[in-house]
Image (cartoon, rainbow, N blue to C red):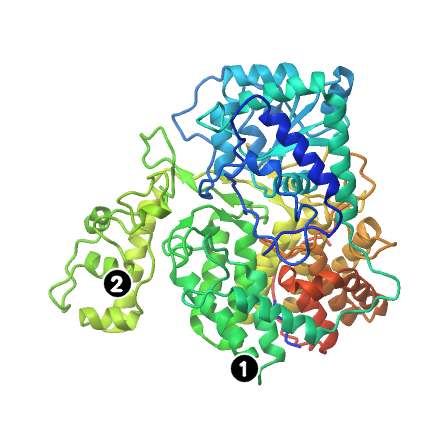
Amino acid sequence: MLRLGFAWSTSSTTTKHIAQARLFTGSLLRKDTPHTLHNSRFSGPPQAPQVGRKSVLASTKLSWDSFRSSGAVFFSMASGSDGPGRLKTPKHTNRLSKEKSSYLLQHAHNPVDWYPWGQEAFDKARSEDKPIFLSVGYSTCHWCHVMERESFEDEEIGKILSENFVCIKVDREERPDVDKVYMTFVQATSGGGGWPMSVWLTPHLKPFIGGTYFPPRDSGRRPGLKTVLLRIISQWQSNRETLESSGERVLEALRKGTEISASPGETLPSSPDVANRCYQQLAHSYEEEYGGFREAPKFPSPVNLMFLMSFWAVNRASSEGAEALQMALHTLRMMALGGIHDHVAQGFHRYSTDTSWHVPHFEKMLYDQGQLAVAYITAYQVSGERLFADVARDVLLYVSRDLSDKSGGFYSAEDADSFPTVESTEKREGAFCVWTAGEIRELLPDIVEGTTGGATQADIFMHHYGVKEQGNVDPAQDPHGELQGQNVLIVRYSVELTAAHFGISVDRLSNLLSDARTKLAEVRRARPPPHLDTKMLASWNGLMLSGFARVGAVLGDKALLERAERAACFLREHLWDEEGQRILHSCYRGDNMEVEQVASPIAGFLDDYAFVVCGLLDLFEATQRVRWLQWAEELQLRQDQLFWDSQGSGYFCSDPSDPTLLLALKQDQDGAEPSANSVSAMNLLRLSHLTGRQDWTQRSQQLLTAFSDRLLKVPIALPDMVRSVMAQHYTLKQVTAVWSTTTECEV
């Protein structure tokens, strides 16, 4: 088999207890008021529609529905950091000022007595018998920062929170284990989820009410955070037993509903059946004109594209195989031409607000770049179309320039919002990336000799990239008016058509466009840059390691392979605890530009092990350096010890013995990132073929069997795992390509 490198739901179970909890909490927050709680503005990867299995909340859209407004949802991200010249002496400083996380530091001067997640906060809640207010977000999340400015900088709200709750702030990228548990609760009790996430817990960490963004004060029929807090305080004092029991019932339902295990005598699902069903479900959701799946907002979804190319690889002679390949390649082409692709500074923005990939939300995430580099180079392998190789290299150029630390590691994200000018006091979405027609005309004024009508370089550039005098952003895609009069560059014509339109050769046009992009890039470098989250995560570095190794191997690019080895050396030096024999989840760029660690390093989660093992296997296959295979074996053995479920098979997302985590979860969703169980199923099979250990093939089969129900009914939820099922059925082929590299590190 050619190895080619969205939906949210939970298990089917009784809905009775969750329904009761929703009725209670709904009445709690509606009591004596016509207001409803607003719970519909999310940030980050928003939750996609439920598919397949009934969720634990399937038929329980009861009173919690009245918590949410009925307005349209727009997704956006931003930074909470200030630029040069905007610093002022803070009035307040809380204990988050001692943290390393960018997101926590953005809340270090709130008038809120914030604690990081940890025993100090838990002990305070228990000793003072206070409920906990848990707030979860991340540093490039727009609505997280809206809530920070509106509510957490508010003196009155800060006083209410500090006096009546133990307030805990969590960076979801730093503690994905905590985020997963409480997001599962919020999704179950509200029917949706997103960030910022707001959850109220008992002193023993059991949730009883949750939501997402809350405005500071009442507005029309929407109650503000102050109203919600006062109501919860009242109920905690007068009706605490009911609050606690309703939360416990929900947790018990979730424990049963999220359980994933292999039944006695259950066998591996049929590969052709699972693969065909996954293809049919994707084809049903495919958008033919611009590619991609479902309607706006549109996400790149590399896991879907990789599955489609794998499906084609084993069904080349069938019409379904040909259609699968066309779906993948068309989507990748349209994304490369669209505004979601940064035509000036390379890389991809997080997602598109419209169907045509035109207007993105402008944040850039490391995990997207790593997966998209692999998807584009795979498309080049199967099609031979040079565009795909160029885009893969383009992604790695962006990461090498803007997301790379001198240690060899990769930063997490670049923000969506920035200051339009040095003098600006308010940030705007996309300000770093967009252009007015006047700016382009001023920057590219030269007349191009020999063109039809004596066109200027600006005329040619604006025609090719769809630049309009009044701006090219539909107001429907700009709910806050931040892009009025601005242009998001999008390729409107092929180079052949643009060249013909202006009566010049394709080569000359290509040179003119390249020169123009270089000039625009210079202007952008002079603009106030967006916030950069310099947190470095093992899992995302593993995904990026795969990107450099795979692209370098296919293109025979020694420099890319050396960069991949530098990344592997970084992981070994800074995110591997030799004494404890464990991966560490995160490290940070310090004030002196050196890699730093927190006092109590966060132990790695399943994602960290699975993604790093995958990256090391890709690196070994690219370089044939045995050191990388050996380390991959060591990490896989440690992963098996830490996370394998010996009773039901499959891997838990985090340490199942952690007493602070109320649910032992196994992720059953390939979404913005592939599920670590999906990646592990393929890792085990690859390791078995490379080392001759048959027990790893058996473990891969056991893992897949645990997810049989999901794979058979809704394989669209796990397209990456479906590829692992296919790999069990079709013989893996090993192709060796050795490239000499010079990077050395201790392994």
Q: Determine whether 357 is above or below 254 in the image.
A: below
Residue 420, image x, y percentages = 33, 37
Q: Which residue is mark 2?
A: 512
The kind of residue on which mark 2 rests is: Leu
Question: Which image quarter is the N terminus in?
Answer: bottom right
**3D distance between C-alphas at marks 2 and 1:** 41 Å
| Nearer to us in this view, 705 or 683 | 705
Q: Determine whether 202 is above or below 581 in the image.
A: above
- Classify residue 662 by image quadrant: top right
The residue at 68%/38% (across/down) is 182
Counting labels gives 2
The residue at 50%/55% (across/down) is 299
In the rendered structure, the answer to whether residue 545 lies left or right of residue 346 reads right
**At numbered mark 1, what does the secondary structure look like: helix, strand or loop?**
helix
Residue 2, image x, y percentages = 63, 76
Q: Which residue is mark 1?
A: 319
Q: Determine whether 29 is above or below 746 in the image.
A: above
* Residue 695 visible (yes or no): yes
Q: Local crowd at mark 1 within 10 Å, few (<14), some, or many (≥20)? A: few
Question: Which image quarter is the C terminus in?
Answer: bottom right
| Nearer to us in this view, 166 or 738 | 166
In the rendered structure, the answer to whether residue 383 lies left or right of residue 429 reads right
In the rendered structure, the answer to whether residue 146 lies left or right of residue 441 reads right
* Residue 590 visible (yes or no): no
Which label lies toward us, 2 or 1?
Answer: 1
